[in-house]
């Protein structure tokens, strides 16, 4: 049986960048591709970045039990398809979920042995700078993300470990150590 690691943290903290670096150094890790109702961003590809679904299709997956976890965030839904995760764990592979706080809480109830890691910014101001620097969100969406980030940051104590992403290389080393890869 493989091991399941959950990484969460506020939008803009660098989860995606850190996971890309982790995978480049540890290709045996299988990362779940999430389903979402949001529109693709430039460069994102169906089945690689996300599975992009209509709200109706997403709701059907929820009703069918086809998602391990799901949450609504900033007006869009995100979720983890259940079957591929279970297949990879059965095959003995390390599985990584990069998901939002509510999803992490749902996974904790389903997989109590999962490693739960919270990725935190060095400061709230730095987090805001990163979110604004993306240039992809309206001011309303930015404010929603920042409000949500404050709530998420207050939940750090729920996790097995907290990794502060102030230096990408150091954060990567700490993450690898927590996952037993170092």
Image: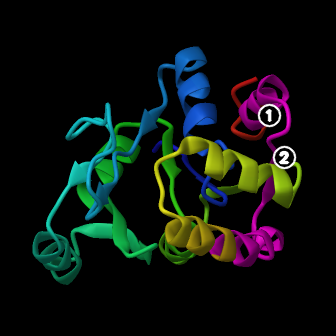
> From the viewer's perspective, is residue 108 above or below residue 81?
below
Q: Position of residue 138 (x, y in %)?
A: 48, 62
The magenta segment: 148-176
In the picture as drawn, the residue positioned furthest to the front comes out as: 139
Mark 1 crowdedness (10 Å alpha carbons): few <14, some 14-19, many ≥20? some
Helix, strand or loop status at disc 1: helix
Tell me where residue 147 sits by quadrant. bottom right
Q: Where is residue 85 in the image (x, y as percent from the top left)?
A: 35, 51
> From the viewer's perspective, is residue 177 above or below residue 27?
below
Q: Which mark is residue 164?
A: 2
Residue at the spot 63% in from the left edge and 51% down from the top edge: 131
Q: Do the residues labelled 2 and 1 touch (CB within 8 Å)?
A: yes
Q: Residue 105 carries which label?
A: none
In the picture as drawn, the residue positioned furthest to the bottom comes out as: 63
Q: Mark 2 vs mark 1: which is more N-terminal?
A: 2
> From the viewer's perspective, is residue 90 above or below residue 25?
below
Q: Position of residue 87 (x, y in %)?
A: 28, 46
Residue at the spot 36% in from the left edge and 65% down from the top edge: 78
Residue at the spot 52% in from the left edge and 50% down from the top edge: 98
Q: In which quarter of the image is the N terminus?
A: top left
Magenta stretch containing residue 170, yes or no? Answer: yes
Q: Is the magenta stretch mostly helix, strand or loop?
A: helix
Q: Quadrant of the C terminus?
A: top right
Q: Position of residue 160 (x, y in %)?
A: 78, 60
Instruction: Report, in whole angstroms, how far the alpha carbon at label 2 lies from the one at label 1.
Output: 7 Å
Of 43 and 67, the residue lying toward us: 43
Can residue 120 be seen here? The reply is no
Q: Answer left or right for 111 relative to 32.
A: right
Residue at the spot 11% in from the left edge and 70% down from the top edge: 57
Q: Which mark is residue 171?
A: 1
Mark 2 crowdedness (10 Å alpha carbons): few <14, some 14-19, many ≥20? some
> From the viewer's perspective, is residue 14 above or below residue 159?
above
């Amino acid at each position: 049986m493989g091991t399941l690691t959950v990484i969460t943290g506020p939008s803009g903290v660098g989860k995606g960048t850190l996971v890309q670096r982790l995978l480049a150094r540890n290709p045996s890790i299988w990362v779940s591709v999430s389903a979402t109702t949001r529109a693709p961003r430039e460069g994102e590809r169906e089945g690689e970045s996300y599975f992009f679904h209509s709200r109706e299709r997403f709701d059907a997956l929820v009703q069918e039990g086809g998602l391990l976890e799901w949450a609504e965030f900033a007006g869009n839904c995100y979720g983890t398809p259940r079957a591929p995760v279970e297949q990879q764990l059965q095959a003995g592979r390390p599985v990584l979920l990069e998901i939002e706080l509510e999803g992490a809480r749902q996974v904790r109830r389903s997989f109590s042995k999962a490693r739960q890691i919270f990725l935190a910014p060095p400061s709230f101001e730095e987090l805001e700078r990163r979110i604004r620097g993306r240039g992809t969100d309206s001011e309303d969406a930015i404010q929603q993300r920042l409000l949500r980030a404050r709530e998420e940051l207050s939940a750090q104590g729920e996790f097995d470990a907290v990794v502060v992403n102030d230096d990408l290389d150091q954060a990567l080393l700490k993450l690898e150590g927590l996952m037993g890869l170092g």
